[in-house]
Amino acid sequence: MRTPMVRSDRRRPRDKPPAAGRPPHCRRFPVRKARYASPLLGASPPVAQAGTAAMPLSGADGNPLNRMRCRSLSRRRDRAGMGTPRAGWGQSDDGYRYRRSWYARLSAGGAIAICIPVRDEAERLPRLFDALERLIVPAETTLFVSLLLDGCHDASAALAAIYRVRSRHGVSVAAVDRAPSNAGRARDRAMRCGIEAAGDDAILLTTDADSVPARDWLCAMVAGLAHADLVTGNVVRPGHGATPGQDRIEDYYGRLFALRRQADPVPWEAARTHHHASGANMGLRAATYVALGGFLPIERGEDARLVDDAARAGLRVRRDAASVVRTSDRRVGRAHGGLATVLREIDQRGLDGVSVAHPADQLWQYRMQGLARASFAVGAFEPLSARLGYSPDHVLGVARDCPNAEAFAMRIVPVPPGGMRQVPFVTAEATLDALTAAVGEAA
């Protein structure tokens, strides 16, 4: 008797693991059954629709484009019996579905690991340790502190050993041999130590040895992670006012990010935002960190790279100003090309030699990302393809490869048609003022 053929186009069982080499947050789903895939919350129930979509169909993303189509698709979903979450699921105010079991674990307590790379920081470690002892720890939560001594030659190891004994938290100390400075490798090792100490379900927070978290830091980060997959908090320099050039730069980028959220609002964003993507103040769950591959072993910029990778994977990145860490404004730092180097160069040369991307070009990208989200939500890509200069087939192909609208918006929008122009900082400031006023009047 001939063995019957097995159909190759049969849908995968729901419990089948993703294909080898493809992390859970990058699963590819059939066009007509999209899921919001997130290592933090798990994949949401299927959503019946005309095209690939993962954002809420009720217009909860705040973008008014195609709102009538959104309502029509929502009614179709309701008629299909999928208008309410299935058993074991809930729906947040911002339209995202979540597993009730995750929130039950969060409210009942859990594990948090603060992961800190240390290299010759004996002078500043006592201040950090005092701040860690003053932290408000959420109820029924176990706090771990993971210190990674990155080839220290000073008294950092002795101070860490003393702190390990006297701390009210669970402190683990690991050490590696001295090697050329590599911020990404050191921070990743600290995070891996945190996972080993606190477990795979823990929340991982990272900061720097020369920084001081606010007392409510843990509470603010846990609250932020109830809405997002990765939270970056605000980083405040104590010398604000002493370095007016750097103050102007930070104010500029803060206003630019606020303009971005006006042009491209997302439901998981904080009410008060900032522009930082810094390892001095960042948090995510251990499963999310592992799925993203961790911090890359690069000399600097590992934090911004992780945030960018998270957004391109479709994860929700929240820049929450309620989470505050104060960092030093020293001029001799540990990372090559880090904040200390930037401050030193501004001290020497001022803002005359500083160039930034033209804010009008960046605003074009923000508006196109907002249009991409709206197009993805309703499965209608013709207006977007015309604006970007892509064929509809190309845009649809990218959409099919994306788990949700966030990933689609981050991947499909290119640089502006004329390229990303560089302009002097003073010119960019004046242009941003005009753009902000114009967007405010249009709203």
Image (cartoon, rainbow, N blue to C red):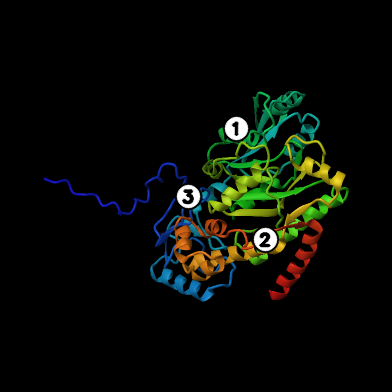
Q: What amino acid is found at the position of numbered circle 1 in the picture?
A: Cys
Q: Kindly identify which residue carries mark 2.
A: 362
Q: Kindly identify which residue carries mark 1.
A: 193
Q: In which quarter of the image is the N terminus?
A: top left
Q: Which residue lies furthest to the front in this view?
A: 418
Q: Quadrant of the C terminus?
A: bottom right
Measuring from the top left, give residue 309's x and y in whole percent.
57, 48
Location of residue 84 (image quadrant): bottom left
* Residue at 30%, 54% in the rendered image: 9
* Residue at 78%, 32% in the rendered image: 126
Q: Mark 2: few, some, or many residues within 10 Å (few <14, many ≥20)?
A: some
Measuring from the top left, give residue 86's x and y in whole percent.
43, 59
Q: What amino acid is found at the position of numbered circle 2 in the picture?
A: Gln
Question: Can I make out residue 28 in this image?
Answer: yes
* Residue at 67%, 66% in the rendered image: 262
Q: Nearer the viewer, residue 177 or 15?
A: 177
Measuring from the top left, give residue 268's x and y in whole percent.
60, 59
Measuring from the top left, give residue 178's x and y in whole percent.
68, 24
Disc sitting over residue 26 in the figure: 3
